[in-house]
Image (cartoon, grey):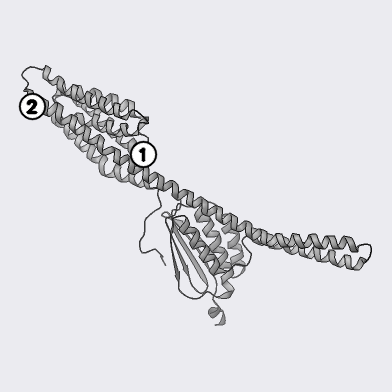
Amino acid sequence: MNPRPPSDPGDAEPARGQLRRINLTMFLPLLAVSGTITVAVYARSWWEAAVLGAGVVATAVSFSRWAAGDVLRVAVPCLVVTAAVWPFAVLVVGSSAAFFGLSCVGSYVIPQLPRRRVAAIVALLAYVGAVGATRLLLPHEDVSDVLLRFVLVPTGATAVLIGLMFPNKRFYDVVDELEEAREREAELAVIRERVRFAGDLHDIQGHTLHVVKLKTALARKLVDTDAERAKQELREIHALVSDTIAQTKELAYAQRRLNLSAELENARNLFEAAGIQVRVDREADVDPGAGELLGQVLRETTTNILRHAQATWVRITLSSSSITILNDGAPRAPRPELRGLAALGQRVAADGGELTVEQSDGRFLTAAAFRSEAQEDR
């Protein structure tokens, strides 16, 4: 069996990471090929090729760090290299295409600046245009051709490229905000689960402590007038405390009696609150004998997904005597030790069932199965 939602959103990877991988895959080879062609066309010697190649490398490095979100770390060296290549290309090589490296690096860096972005744009455009105009200092140059190829086109293309990068930055900001909102929702879901656990603990201990208080007060009054009645009250207090201790241990190890339908609805609400798509498939009505432990497996798995995974979807499949929970977003690292599931596995095995936990290809599978009543009657 290979359960899988009909629309598989793929491995859970932060959206910025996915966009970075797409950008690097699509555009970095294009930059490298374009730069190589420019060097091959305009360079007449190995040292000219080395200078133009340095501009290509600086452009590729800045693009890679921009995609990773930390272009400012390499901004200064990349700007220095590409700014030096542009006048070399204008005055020595005669290449009007070499402005593209400086334009790219500038467009990556300027939108990330915390302030003085307008001044940076004006300075970059003025530098590109002024350097291009120095071509007029060379003899036998056509003025209109120089102004078009080395001034107007480079300056205009740089302005357009910078203008396009500001909406792009806003898009990335929105993606980051959505990721942060999703993380907050997951944290809130875990907090709600803890509050629910605290409520269960209060239900177990609150009433008991109140009764113990009343019985202790009664036993204290009866100790001198009715010793036998006082002893009976103390025996009841001892039994009540022992029972409460046992219930608290069961709750701590997820062994308190659970209602599978209630746990299923709770899991659905928690996942949806965390922005996780959830699908439930009921293949048959669950046997009453298996429902309690299946509910415990569902509760523990729900908590693990919210705490340890970056899930975008969860699929829950129920049969008469089994439950399968499949989610994406599992870390690529080796499977962590999940003590709650390990304890549940021992209890499931003690009741004649089997708990399976598997992690592969970014997916995590938790499955528990018991012998059905029909199988046991055979």
> Dot 1 corresponds to which residue?
68
Three-letter amino acid code of the residue under disc 1: Ala
Mark 2 residue element = helix
Q: Position of residue 209 (x, y in %)?
A: 75, 59
Residue lying farthest bottom? 378
Quarter of the image for the C terminus: give it: bottom right
Q: Position of residue 76 (x, y in %)?
A: 33, 26
Q: Position of residue 111 (x, y in %)?
A: 32, 34
Q: Position of residue 366 (x, y in %)?
A: 50, 61
Evaluate whether residue 83 shows in this view: yes
Number of numbered discs on residues? 2
**First in sequence: mark 2 vs mark 1:** 1
Mark 1 residue element = helix
Evaluate whether residue 47 shows in this view: no
Along the viewing direction, whichever of 201 and 45 lies nearer the viewer: 201
Report the residue at 56% width, 56% height from top: 193
Question: Label 2 neighbourhood size at 10 Å, few (<14), some (14-19), many (20+)?
Answer: few
> Dot 2 corresponds to which residue?
145
Q: Is residue 149 left or right of residue 220?
A: left
Q: Is residue 248 left or right of residue 376?
A: right
